[in-house]
Amino acid sequence: MEATTTLGDIFQKCRDFTDAATVRNQGLYPYFRPIEGFAGARVISEGRELIMAGSNNYLGLSLDPRVREAAVNAVMDYGASCSGSRFMNGTLKLHEELEERLARFVDKPAALCFTTGYQTNLGVISALVGNGDHIITDKLNHASIMDGIFMSLGMTRGVNVHRFKHNNMEQLEQILQSLPADAPKLLVTDGVFSMEGDIVKLPQVRALAERFGVRVYLDEAHAIGVVGATGRGTVEHYNNSAAADLVMCTFSKSFGSIGGFVAGNEDVIDFIKHFARPLIFSASMPPSNLAAAMKSLEIIETEPERVTRLQQIAERMRRGFTDLGFNIGTSETAVVPLIIGDNQKTFRFWKYLYENGVYVNPVISPAVPPNRALIRTSFMAIHEDSDLDRVLELSAEAGTVAGIL
């Protein structure tokens, strides 16, 4: 039986939250739409086939038959779950093999797998940053980075947090100049920013880090498989594998699986193993996801033409949207935002595309700054040219309907 409502009821905030209901009543609610099936670059949603132009499956590997087969075989060999944390009975030989291969792939001595990319950022940041330490972060870094910082703050209360304007190297330099020279410092940044689609100014970041004695932690979730001649991410894009002290990535994007890893020097990785609470107190990656990520890694290494195709598609779509009159901000990658600003116009734009056969993602605050609502489009190496033409055609129509163009 439900308890009688009283003053100070913690559930009152739930009853007061009406924003979602308002948008639902307007017929504009875009979230939690179930996908019923996949067919290449298309999905089935609510019984209709749509072009998927909002997935992070950048190389299309989650649908690759070789990746699927590897996942199925791992279930048959190891079962559906490890039923324990990495610290206890949850480490398989598959974990260690994948970690060795990932370390070689990103040119680091060692790597460590977590159950999700989100937990990777929570675990690494909260393990490394403690009382009296300084962490410096781009204001547009992913929420998982910020939550790792919040976890550090919650655990010690003595962490010093400094945020600089997006990709603003002048402000970053000012912040670093103001910090004590002998204080431990970690600079955390995305490689490719998940909403803007632009790339961190890594050479400048590295130069400042060396000048001021700062360690660099690079989140490559949207970079590996996306940028660099062979998909090795931001460090390859700038041809400097030593630009980051720690490299993090998730398996839920280009690797077509789920999970995450961090790579760096052996002593640092060993420390993280013993102090990252999200690693110690979570069940480990299941065998199917390990095998899928490992097969995807093999494909990325042996089929660089997938990365080339993705980059060609990304360039075509950035140019196409710009020619139509859309504001795509500073995008340089397969993430191409259509910046609208107004929430209602953003939802109307989304609805027109959804109803006419294109699946994209409307993004509003707090996922982006206030008054910067956008349609996040993202593309895959498996898109056909006809798919891309159709997305551009319908986007132009949607822009007119929503009052944007």
Image (spheres, grey):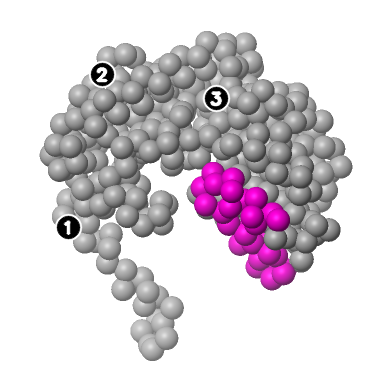
Q: Which residues are magenta?
A: 149-177
Element under disc 3? loop
Q: Which residue is mark 2?
A: 389
Q: Position of residue 240 (x, y in %)?
A: 70, 26
Mark found first going from the N terminus, 3 or 2: 3
Amino acid at dot 3: Val
Question: How far is the residue under mark 3 from the one under mark 2?
Answer: 23 Å
The crowd level at tag 2 (other Cα within 10 Å; few <14, some 14-19, many 20+) is: some
Residue at 35% from the left image edge and 47% from the top image edge: 363
- Between 348 and 281, the residue placed more toward the observer is 348
- Between 369 and 48, the residue placed more toward the observer is 369
Amino acid at dot 2: Asp
Amino acid at dot 1: Asn
Residue 199 drawn in magenta = no
Left or right relative to 140: residue 122: right
Q: Position of residue 127 (x, y in %)?
A: 74, 54
Element under disc 2? helix
Q: Which residue is mark 3?
A: 227
